[in-house]
Amino acid sequence: MTKNILITGGAGFIGSHVVRLFVKKYPQYKIVNLDKLTYAGNLENLADIEGMPNYKFVKADITSAEEIFSLFKENCFDGVIHLAAESHVDRSIANPVEFIFTNIIGTVNLLNAARDCWKDNMQDKLFYHISTDEVYGSADDGSFFTESTSYDPKSPYSASKASSDHLVRAYHNTYRLPVVISNCSNNYGPYQFPEKLIPLAINNIKNNKQIPVYGKGENIRDWLYVEDHARAIDLIFHKAEPGKTYNIGGNNEWKNIDLIKKLCEIMDDRLKRPAGTSAGLITFVKDRAGHDLRYAIDSSMLQKELGWKPSLQFEEGLAKTVDWYLANDTWLSHIISGDYEKYYENQYVNR
Ligand code: NAD
Ligand code: TYD
């Protein structure tokens, strides 16, 4: 069956993996990737699939109702997979307003456009909102987040994502818009912007720079390889009942300091440095304001109902990730130099 699918935020980290998976796996689908190309959007992430006949890139801003409605007038999509967001907690602490516009107003603009487009026939339509486990707050008591855990967001980022989740559910309840939501734990893997912990640490170790560890490094995150998240999204998009929410996680909790030490070991091995060299770069710095202690996801509903499970052990995934960053030095150096921002102009404008 053919489908016309809009993926938002497809030039970002997770979005690029989702776009690649869908474009390659479903040649009969038409995939439109909408992205504003903020600092986090990098079309070099998709250079390998750019010429595929079932793929199209559209530069647009989800905070502009006009741009979104005009795109939906051209294509009344069968499905929307919504990943576009401001996604970095530290940036949300420095500048919360951007998060309110993109994550809340942007989501409402997409919901309104889908609602308008699908008003006469909602059969086989789906609005899939991609969210985070951070909406549940911090599981300090050792419990796991399930789909019925109460929302308790604690950063401007997680509060803006929680707000967008509530709005998506409200559109289902009020207008019967067919929606699904998934809330995933921390992702890692190729193409992640080096402001997030793992790629930042890899880049710093490579360049013999200090590795900043917030507080005492005792905070715990549940890490999932990004391609496992993309597979879960594919499954949920095709199999989930409208109205459902699924939690996605790696069942893989690590204290930040233990993760960094493991990463240092792998880097010493790959860079042929004496054991312990990279760990010497670890530097404890001022803690993040309001830093959530622990995230931990219970993904048993997704496993039981849709048969998903993570494919990689963490140590294998981490080694694979290190190897990818070391082999893709040009990708990384374009980000560090800012050259990646010229890719759109060169590829799409000045041709
Ligand atoms: P990212 O920051 O790497 O990518 C976000 C993308 O959205 C970028 O390409 C950016 O250009 C685009 N974008 C931002 N503002 C836009 C706007 N106004 N209009 C159009 N496009 C815009 O983020 P990511 O890590 O790939 O996360 C993707 C989604 O998954 C987000 O919704 C995030 O909340 C969610 N999520 C992320 C993680 C994680 O560990 N990274 C975990 C769970 C959920
Ligand atoms: P991050 O990758 O920003 O993801 P999130 O805040 O969404 O979980 O951070 C992961 C963990 O690593 C988090 O506990 C904050 C910590 N951290 C550091 O200790 N140093 C750093 O330089 C960064 C970016 C994060």
Image (tube, helix red, strand yellow):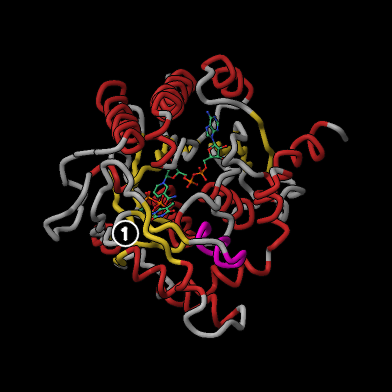
Q: Amino acid at mark 1?
A: Arg
Task: Give the vertical position of 300 relative to 150 (above or below).
Answer: below
Q: x%, y% of residue 8?
A: 53, 37
Which element carries disc 1, helix, strand or loop? strand
| Residue interval drawn in magenta | 199-208
Task: Give the vertical position of 68 relative to 7 (above or below).
Answer: above
137 relative to 6 in the view: left or right: left
Q: Badge 1, how many Cα within 10 Å: few under 14, some, many 20+?
A: many
Residue 305 in view here: no
Task: Give the vertical position of 12 relative to 100 (above or below).
Answer: below
Residue drawn at (26%, 57%) of the image: 297
Outermost residue to the left: 141
156 relative to 22 in the view: left or right: left
| Secondary structure mostly taken by the magenta-highlighted segment of the chain | helix
Q: x%, y% of residue 34?
A: 60, 34
Residue 72 in view here: yes
- Under 8 Å from ligand 2: the CB of mark 1? yes
Q: Which residue is mark 1?
A: 221
Q: Is residue 97 magenta?
A: no
Task: Give the vertical position of 331 relative to 30 (above or below).
Answer: below
Outermost residue to the right: 351
